[in-house]
Amino acid sequence: MYIKYDPSVIRGFADELYRRADTIVIVNAAIFGLVGALLGGVVKGAGVAIIAALVAGGIGYYLGLQKAFLLKLQAQTALCQVKIEENTGKVA
């Protein structure tokens, strides 16, 4: 079975990676903040819960930025491969 090259599949993959990158920062910050608030509230009370939520949310935000960068880099790599195929496919 021969599968024909279809650049729209790769472009769709890259679009999906960018959508995930756009949401992962907020989701990470929210989840980390919620866990921080819960743990802080259980350990010491409401005052500590707020501080723990802010600190944990900041950590989640930072980690989300790192993951978003990797997703965007993966998308750009895939798009670069499409461009290479477009440029070299015309020569042959």
Image: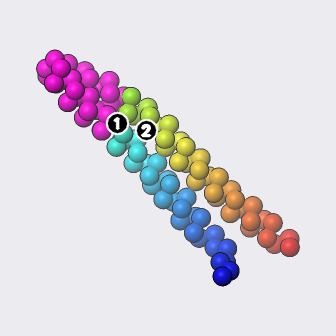
| Distance from Cα at disc 1 to Cα at disc 2 | 7 Å
Q: Label 2 sits on what residue type?
A: Gly
Q: Label 1 sits on what residue type?
A: Ala
Query: Does residue 51 belong to the magenta stretch?
Result: yes
Position above or below: 35 against 77: above
Q: Residue 76, image x and y in percent?
A: 62, 52
Q: Residue 52, image x and y in percent?
A: 26, 23
Contact (CB < 8 A) between labels 1 and 2? yes
The picture quadrant where one finds residue 2 is: bottom right
| Label placed on residue 64 | 2
Q: Can residue 50 be seen in this view?
A: no
| Label placed on residue 62 | none
Looking at the image, the residue that sits furthest to the left is 45
Looking at the rendering, the stretch of residues picked out in magenta corresponds to 31-58
Q: Is the magenta stretch mostly helix, strand or loop?
A: helix
| Residue 88 relative to residue 10: left or right | right
Query: Does residue 72 belong to the magenta stretch?
Result: no
Determine the residue positioned at 45% across, 55% down.
Answer: 19
Where is mark 1, residue-wise?
A: 29
Label 2 element class: helix
